[in-house]
Image (cartoon, helix red, strand yellow):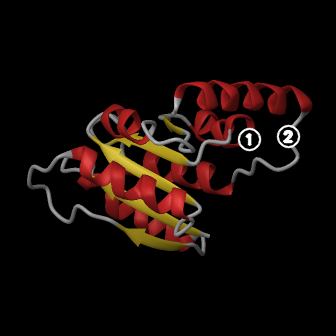
Amino acid sequence: MIVAIGCDHGGFPLKQAVTDKIKALGFEVLDFGTDSAESVDYPDYAVQVSKAVLSGKAERGILICGSGVGVCITANKFKGIYASVAHDVYTAAQGVTHDNMNILCLGGRVISPSQAVKLTEAFLTATAKGQEDRHLRRINKVLEVERKNFK
């Protein structure tokens, strides 16, 4: 699996730990930056990671900003992106298994590097295959909302 990663300065302190975990899981990293703690604008990185996922250059993405919220809002502006903030292991995995989440958003000022590593593993090892009918029904409803509102 190829995983796109991007962060702003607020997420930069977690980026190396997350990148190392992705590689330790045997996945390839497509790194969109940033590469320092100097102030940058989070939407620039969220756009690049979202486009990589949508184009198929990456199967999943991880975005990191100070809270995780800004990158999440930006990523979800793209039709076909299902991004969520997750700061616990259950949500990081459940977002994939129940909701087809394809981008994990983390808060660099909210969680520790060790927690980020756990969330990364939960997100990347979870699978949406074999979903129960109730989850598929709900996902289809979400897709219908997307069809009606993204023109």
Residue at 44%, 52% (x, y): give it. 50
Kind of residue at badge 1: Thr
Residue 125: numbered disc: none
Answer left or right for 146 relative to 73. Answer: right
Q: Secondary structure at mark 2?
A: loop
Q: Residues within 10 Å of mark 2 (few under 14, many from 20)?
A: some
Residue at 42%, 42% (x, y): give it. 75
Residue at 27%, 64% (x, y): give it. 33
Answer left or right for 18 relative to 142. Answer: left
The CA distance from mark 2 to mark 1 is 7 Å
**Toward the viewer: 61 or 25?**
61
Give how far across and how far down residue 111 sits, in percent: 37, 39
Give how far across and how far down residue 65 sits, in percent: 29, 43
Residue 97: numbered disc: 1
Answer left or right for 49 relative to 132. Answer: left
Query: If you read the primary sequence from the N terminus, does the residue marked by circle 2 or circle 1 appear first?
Result: 1
Quarter of the figure that contains the N terminus: bottom right
Give how far across and how far down residue 12 sits, in percent: 24, 54
Kind of residue at badge 2: Gln
Give how far across and how far down residue 41 sits, in percent: 17, 46
Q: Residues within 10 Å of mark 1 (few under 14, many from 20)?
A: some
Q: Secondary structure at mark 1?
A: helix
Q: Is residue 88 above or below residue 14?
A: above
Q: Verify CB contact (< 8 Å) between mark 2 and mark 1.
A: yes
Q: Is residue 107 above or below residue 137?
A: below
Q: Which residue is mark 2?
A: 131
Residue at 89%, 34% (x, y): give it. 132
Corner quadrant of residue 100: top right
Answer left or right for 112 relative to 34. Answer: right
